[in-house]
Image (spheres, grey):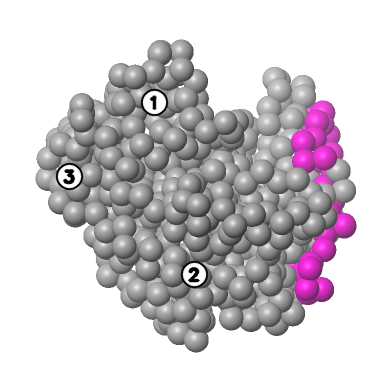
């Protein structure tokens, strides 16, 4: 690390010491990003959002790479430019959370891969600053998983794995692979399929191939008939993100192809009470995924990358899952929130069902860059009156309660309890008995002949501007 950073880091650690002692221990997820920034404005959009969560995610690398859309150059200077905008609002962000890292620390994490496309940049003598940085992060003495979020091509990661396989023992390679978690935004070069085939035990989330319409991550920007899509509209983005929100908001570019197509690769790392990164099958802000081998013919357009077909998958991967979703509705009179009438069922709704929540969260954090703490909104803090894991008997009652829930700004709160059947082993319908929007709720366990699990989600939303949401997930084991 450059000597110039040492005093910055020393001051940063000194500043954090009294705050860390006052807060409960929380180990944020580790994240290293590979981005083909400048191939599409959406990488810059995703980076702007990511920096607003740098207080809750340990960013360990920002590596400029190629992709099928930008094959012969990498643009690390564009990453630096966004961090420079972050530097102008860093002091304001510290008023909301002292854990925001100094801009100089983030600048030191910017690296670059080779300006070559796909597997043409992988092999003996193909190491790069970026691939070496991946290895360094993976070998760091830290037991937490390392998430690799791939916004473009994956060949920098492929080169790191190639080097590790040729220079480490099999035992050491296996140990490092167990620490690695990968989420790629579809396949944007031919190295992703190579990685999945050559490292069959690697934790890997992807909607494979280059047909973006067949990808879960598109749920962030798909316009869904029958719902309010305003939080991804250009007007909403201009009002809440780009204009009048300070230098970081001004750095957020207009949409060219789709808004923030890369953001789903790390949304599940935000500690919001719903996200469970080690359980993609449980669902969260980044979508829901199941572990299986997709059986897709090589003649199917979904398997093509840049017009070239790729081999069929050779092993199970975490990939598209389907939710049945009934959006709740607000009532003008009577019960304030209740289940709606319209139902949706597909893989993209596993992500867009949470979209208004994470868009409002983004807008609130952008306000943190220009407003003092007392004038901005901060998320509520749901607190259960019982453990988050319960065991009940077949056909018996399930009692749920969160009366200790609070809000740091003193805002009024709305509650909503609902089952998430796709996240448990029991797929039958279990409903809330009575009002879903009180601080307590009850349900009746299904009658089972073997142990089954159910999941319920408590959604708590404040009445601040913009309204912010946090959750509690309850896992119920039902015994026969």
Callout 1 secondary element? loop
Query: Foreground: 295 or 82?
Result: 82
Which of disc 1 and disc 2 is earlier in sequence? 2
Q: Please, what secondary structure does the residue beneath circle 3 have? A: loop
For label 2, the SS is helix
Q: Quadrant of the image for the C terminus?
A: top right
Disc 1 target residue = 316
Magenta highlight on residue 405: yes
Q: Which mark is residue 86?
A: 2
Q: Residue at x 24, y 54 (%)?
A: 74
Badge number at residue 465: none
Q: Which residue sits at x=64%, y=81%?
A: 371
* Location of residue 307 by image quarter: top left
Q: Nearer the viewer, residue 115 or 360?
A: 115
Q: Which residues are magenta?
A: 387-414
Label located before the other in sequence (3 or 1):
3
Residue 416's x, y, as percent? 72, 59
């Amino acid at each position: 690390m450059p000597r110039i950073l040492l005093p910055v880091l020393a001051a940063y650690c000194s500043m954090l010491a009294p705050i860390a002692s006052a807060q409960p221990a929380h180990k944020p997820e580790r994240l290293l990003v590979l981005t083909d920034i400048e191939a599409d404005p959406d990488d810059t959009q995703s980076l702007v959002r990511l920096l607003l969560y740098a207080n809750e995610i340990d960013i360990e690398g920002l590596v400029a790479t190629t992709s099928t859309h930008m094959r012969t150059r990498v643009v690390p200077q564009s990453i630096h430019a966004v961090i420079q905008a972050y530097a102008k609002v860093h002091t304001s962000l510290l008023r909301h959370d002292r854990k925001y890292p100094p801009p100089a620390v983030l600048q030191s994490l910017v690296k670059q891969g080779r300006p070559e496309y796909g597997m043409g940049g992988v092999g003996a003598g193909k190491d790069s600053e970026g691939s070496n940085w991946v290895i360094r992060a993976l070998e760091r003495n830290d037991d937490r998983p390392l998430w690799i979020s791939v916004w473009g091509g994956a060949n920098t990661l492929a080169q790191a794995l190639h080097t590790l396989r040729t220079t480490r023992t099999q035992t050491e390679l296996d140990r490092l692979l167990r620490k690695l978690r990968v989420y790629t935004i579809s396949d944007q070069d031919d190295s992703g399929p190579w990685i999945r085939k050559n490292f069959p035990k690697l934790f890997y989330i992807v909607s494979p191939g280059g047909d973006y319409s067949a990808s879960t991550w598109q749920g962030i920007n798909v316009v869904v008939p029958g719902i309010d899509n305003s939080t991804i509209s250009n007007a909403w983005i201009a009002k809440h993100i780009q204009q009048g929100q300070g230098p970081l908001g001004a750095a957020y570019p207009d949409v060219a192809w789709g808004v923030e197509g890369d953001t789903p690769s790390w949304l599940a790392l935000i500690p919001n009470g719903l996200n469970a990164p080690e359980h993609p099958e449980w669902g969260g802000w980044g979508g829901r995924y199941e572990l299986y081998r997709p059986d897709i013919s090589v003649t199917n357009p979904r398997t093509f990358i840049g017009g070239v077909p790729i081999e069929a998958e050779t092993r199970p991967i975490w990939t598209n899952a389907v939710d049945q979703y009934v959006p709740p509705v607000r009532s003008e009179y009577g019960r304030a929130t209740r289940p709606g009438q319209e139902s949706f069922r597909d893989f993209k709704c596993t992500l867009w069902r949470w979209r208004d929540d994470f868009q409002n969260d983004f807008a609130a954090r952008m306000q943190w860059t220009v407003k003092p703490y007392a004038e901005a909104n901060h998320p509520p803090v749901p607190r259960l009156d019982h453990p988050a894991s319960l065991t009940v008997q077949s056909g018996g009652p399930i009692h749920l309660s969160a009366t200790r829930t609070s809000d740091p700004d003193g805002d009024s709160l709305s509650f909503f309890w609902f089952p998430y059947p796709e996240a448990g082993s029991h797929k039958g319908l279990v409903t809330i008995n009575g009002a879903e929007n009180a601080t307590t709720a009850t349900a009746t366990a299904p009658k089972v002949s073997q142990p089954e699990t159910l999941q319920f989600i408590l959604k708590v939303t404040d009445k601040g501007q913009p309204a912010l949401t946090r959750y509690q997930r309850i896992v119920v084991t039902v015994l026969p």
